Amino acid sequence: MWMHCVQLIENLVILGDFNIDFNRENNFKYLDTLRVNLNMTPVFSKCLTFKDLSQLDWCLTNKSNPFGQIKSFQILVPH
């Protein structure tokens, strides 16, 4: 039910600490679920956000490049 409602949103951005690294092979299936069901793709990838050199923080959108030019920089803070 909720997925149908989300699919109706024209400009959708989901961001936060997902506690999962979609870059890791055994986690691809979760990102694929978001791609197939909600047309969501990462705004950035392979950007390390955790001390074990993984990416747990993500920004996903259903539009291609909705923010124009994006620059990322590395800041690691202790959790």
Image (cartoon, helix red, strand yellow):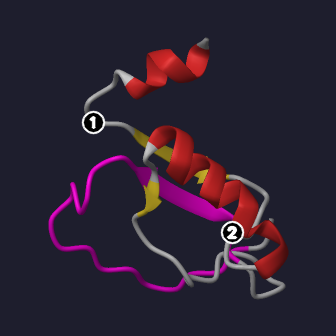
Task: For marks 1 and 2, give the CA distance.
Answer: 22 Å
In x, y percent, where is residue 32? 62, 58
Depicted 17 relative to depicted 38: above or below: below
Residue at position x 17%, y 73% from top? 69
In x, y percent, where is residue 45? 51, 77
Residue at position x 23%, y 63% from top? 65
In x, y percent, where is residue 66? 21, 55
Q: Which residue is mark 1?
A: 11
Quarter of the image where one finds residue 49: bottom right
Identify the image quadrant of the C terminus. Answer: bottom right
Identify the image quadrant of the N terminus. Answer: top right
Badge 1 amino acid? Asn
Residue 26 lies in the magenta-colored region: no
Depicted 65 relative to depicted 71: above or below: above
Check the image and name the residue furthest to the top. Answer: 1
The stretch of residues the image draws in magenta is: 55-77
Front one among 72 and 14: 14
Q: Secondary structure at mark 1?
A: loop
Residue at position x 72%, y 55% from top? 30
Check the image and name the residue furthest to the left. Answer: 68
What secondary structure predominates along the stretch shown in magenta?
Answer: loop
Residue at position x 84%, y 85% from top? 52
Relative placement, left or right, of 1 versus 30 is left
Going from the N terminus, do you reach mark 1 or mark 2 first?
A: 1
Counting other residues with Cα less than 10 Å from the Cα at mark 1, is it few (<14), some (14-19), or many (20 or more)?
A: few
Front one among 30 and 68: 30
Badge 2 amino acid? Phe
Residue 74 lies in the magenta-colored region: yes
Q: Which residue is mark 2?
A: 22
